[in-house]
């Protein structure tokens, strides 16, 4: 079963009052600089190379101007991946045709088994339109790192293997900027709220979300 891995940042060295004040000031200035220069922020997809479910090099530039929802998983996933796609299908019914403006991208973390043909067959059975992407392990690792996605192959005695991975949907606005995340435990109202905000062009400009 896929699991969520989170990273907790910790302060390793104590600072005095003066140092803390300087740090806070620097953080505030950095945040302002990110917002002020946001128009020049690089796309979340710049420099990435993967293959789509039709066996073609995927042109990430084609995502420009569209809101995007990125999900990492694998076709042999027994629960989390199909459940997430099912929930997106439900939200598509609730939000209506406008939902189709969102480009949904499924990035396989299992390139050994998830060939373009396998992905194509898998995506054709989903309740929403999804583009499946695969590639070399190095290219997939690069994209996973871009979105801070944990993934690890787990050998199962007497079976093949499974892949533990971060089970979030990553939202990217039409300008290619990270604009939020829907975690696996989000309820229906959070799903709908964040997807509607994505469609409306709302963007979380917190520096943490800049790529």
Image (tube, grey):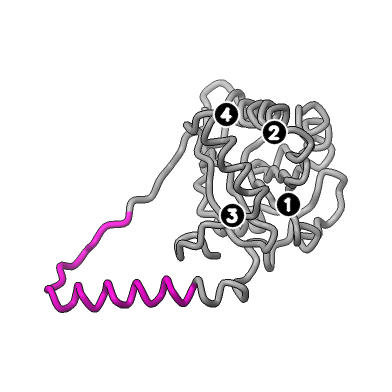
* SS under mark 1: loop
Q: CA distance from mark 4 to mark 3?
A: 27 Å
Earlier sequence position, callout 2 versus callout 4:
4
Looking at the rendered image, the quarter that the C terminus falls into is bottom right
- Specify the label residue 135 is tagged with: 1
Q: Which residue is mark 4?
A: 80
Which secondary structure type mostly characterizes the magenta part of the structure?
Answer: helix
Name the residue rendered at 55%, 77% in the picture.
Answer: 37
Earlier sequence position, callout 3 versus callout 2:
2
- Specify the label residue 202 is tagged with: 3
Earlier sequence position, callout 3 versus callout 1:
1
Q: Which residue is mark 2?
A: 95
Query: Which numbered disc, 4 or 3, marks the residue closer to the eye?
Result: 3
* SS under mark 2: helix
Q: Which residues are magenta?
A: 9-34
Q: CA distance from mark 2 to mark 4?
A: 22 Å
Q: Is residue 30 left or right of residue 65?
A: left
* SS under mark 4: helix
Q: Is residue 189 above or below residue 65?
A: above
Q: Is residue 76 visible?
A: no
Query: Which numbered disc, 4 or 1, marks the residue closer to the eye?
Result: 4
């Amino acid at each position: 079963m896929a699991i969520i891995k989170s990273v907790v940042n910790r302060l390793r060295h104590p600072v005095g009052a003066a140092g803390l004040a300087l740090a806070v000031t620097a953080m505030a200035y950095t945040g302002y600089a990110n917002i002020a220069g946001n128009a020049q922020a690089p796309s979340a997809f710049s420099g990435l190379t993967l293959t789509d479910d039709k066996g073609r090099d995927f042109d990430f530039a084609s995502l420009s101007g569209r809101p995007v929802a990125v999900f990492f998983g694998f076709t042999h996933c027994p629960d989390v991946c199909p459940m997430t796609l099912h929930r997106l299908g439900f939200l598509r019914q609730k939000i209506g045709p406008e939902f189709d403006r969102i480009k949904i991208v499924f990035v396989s973390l299992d390139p050994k088994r998830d060939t373009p043909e396998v992905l194509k067959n898998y995506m054709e059975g989903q309740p929403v339109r999804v583009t499946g992407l695969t590639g070399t392990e190095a290219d997939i690792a690069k994209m996973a790192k871009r979105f801070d996605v944990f993934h690890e192959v787990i050998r199962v005695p007497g079976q093949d293997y499974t892949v533990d991975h971060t089970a979030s949907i990553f939202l990217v606005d039409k300008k290619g900027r990270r604009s939020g995340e829907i975690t696996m435990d989000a309820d229906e109202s959070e799903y709908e709220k964040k997807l509607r905000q994505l469609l409306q062009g709302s963007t979380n400009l917190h520096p943490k979300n800049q790529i």
